[in-house]
Image (tube, rainbow, N blue to C red):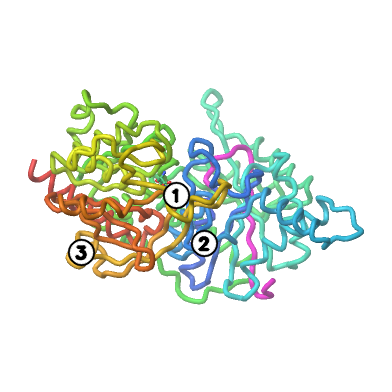
Amino acid sequence: MGQSTKYIFITGGVTSSLGKGIIAASLGKLLQSRGFSVTIQKFDPYLNIDPGTLNPYEHGECYVTDDGAETDLDLGHYERFLNVTTSQSNNITTGRIYNNVITKERKGEFLGKTVQVIPHITDEIKSNFYKLGHDGKYDVVITEIGGCVGDIESLPFIEAVRQARWDLGPGNFLVIHLTLIPYLKAAKELKTKPTQHSVKQLLEAGIQPDILVCRTEYHLPPDVKKKLALFCNVQLNSVIEAMDAESIYDVPLLMKKEKLDERVMSKLKLSSKTHADLEDWKDFLGRLKNPTQEVTIGLIGKYVSLPDSYKSIIESFTHAGAAVECKVNLKLISSEEINSENFSSKLDELDGILVAPGFGERGFEGKIETVRYARENQVPFFGICLGMQVAVIEFSRNVLGLEEANSTEMDPKTPHPVIGLMEEQKKIDQMGGTMRLGSYACDLKKGSKAALAYGKTKIQERHRHRYEFNNEYLEQVESKGMIATGKNPNTGLVEIMELKNHPWFVGVQFHPEYKSTVLNPQPLFVKFIQAAIDNKKQK
Ligand code: GLN
């Protein structure tokens, strides 16, 4: 471990969904604004090696990093807040820890020994805690421990945190416990007991939290703070109130007001490298909260009942909307509910249409109807991954007249496989981590909508797919006005499709949403919103 690197661990108590990821990202932002280099990692207690094999309904979106890791969606928050990239090392699951230990056991690395949770699993966890701090690149490594204190499955992580205190030594180690202070309407009281219990559980595991961050719907009166400090064994000024915020992007400023960064710096004996500077952030918030115009955009997908499935897309609209001072009313519409009879009642009010990424057949025909509507009615259209593939299929069926055109994902026997399995995918028989993943180059056609948006012709974007456009149909498709405006320079794989005679119709095989951050809104989202604004004006 890097000697000078400071480690902050964030645990959660009382209930899940308190927003540990946002607190971690906000603290990271505040420390970064004071000149420290910061990274954030997440340790998840489940047994999957990574969330890539999870249904979005289980765990929300699977976030993909440059190096092609399929990770927890909190890594998206880390990147969006800190404007730095993360990697496989930033997201570790129990499954990966056990897999590593068992692989070592088979290699004979523990020859003669009984392999046990303590020390072998906890050692593996700790070596992963310290991995990003090794080369001294970061002043601070923040580690978010997924799940809730007291869960059986997070016990080895909690034990590893306990041991880390002794590895790292005083002044280099800090635990922040995020907890909930519920308000009982009938009693008109904020209750501290659940927090007392969850801190007690931490203490039983040998961990004394240094700071409590208390999620609450009402301000914490001084007597409640005092009670928490007394019963939970923390300094009074280390009981931090975290009121519900209007937007997740308000949280860094709220935490600054509550002096979370100052408490952390004083406990870790860190002195600010520069004057805290959040001007860019405040500027973003100002534009976000004072829009001068408004558009309605439809996000058509099949996982809409859990908006977290589309987290990065939703956040990309927030960043891009703020960039052009436009409020984006995003309507999540289930593609299963769209058919050839009702499409116009579902889509007429939209100024722009986005067809989302996805897998499998369910809701597919609704997506075809949606693309047809956008194409024929000149409504700005943005297709992402499966969304681009649907656009190609719709065009092949309704413009080229290839009625049964399809992706071999939906119909393996289609006579017109305009979308097919990538060559390297054909020999793959394992599902986990085997898609075409991570960052690849793409060359843009000069003068295309994409090149105009990016302001350059060489880009890198992140991917997560198995199927691709079948280049055997390229000539036919282009001759009727659907143009491949982005291609991988090495393989010729089509990355972007645009329609010639349409105000803004762009389908991308990659996932632009993974690279949108507060300070770097994604250019295609910005241009798509502008096209929607223009469309609204013309209506
Ligand atoms: N199912 C499609 C494929 O694997 C699209 C994937 C996606 O939208 N991420 O190619």
| Residues at marks 1 and 2, CA–CA distance in whole angstroms | 35 Å
Q: Is residue 8 magenta?
A: yes
Q: Residue furthest front?
A: 415
Label 2 residue SS:
helix
Residue at left offset 74%, top offset 61%: 164
Front residue of 279 and 346: 346
> How crowded is the residue under tag 3: few (<14 C-alpha within 10 Å), some, or many (20+)?
some
Asked if the residue at label 3 sits under 8 Å from ligand 1, the reply is no
Q: Is residue 538 left or right of residue 143?
A: left
Q: For mark 3, what is the residue? A: 452
| Residues at marks 3 and 2, CA–CA distance in whole angstroms | 34 Å
Q: Within the image, what quadrant is residue 346 found in?
A: top left
Front residue of 318 and 454: 454
Q: Is residue 142 left or right of residue 65?
A: right
Instruction: Return the disc, 3 or 1, that comes first in the chain's sequence.
Output: 3
Q: Are marks 3 and 2 in contact (CB under 8 Å)?
A: no
* Position of residue 284 measured from the top left corner of the image (x, y, whole percent): 32, 59
- Label tally: 3
Residue at left offset 21%, top offset 33%: 347
Label 3 residue SS:
helix
Q: Is residue 488 magenta?
A: no
Q: For mark 1, what is the residue? A: 466
* Position of residue 235 measured from the top left corner of the image (x, y, whole percent): 66, 55
- Looking at the picture, which amino acid does disc 1 mark? Arg
- Looking at the picture, which amino acid does disc 3 mark? Leu
* Position of residue 23 measured from the top left corner of the image (x, y, whole percent): 52, 52
Residue at left offset 59%, top offset 67%: 140
Front residue of 408 and 334: 408
Q: Within the image, what quadrant is residue 524 found in?
A: bottom left
Residue at left offset 75%, top offset 56%: 103
Instruction: State which region is magenta.
Output: 1-19
Instruction: Return the disc, 1 or 2, that comes first in the chain's sequence.
Output: 2
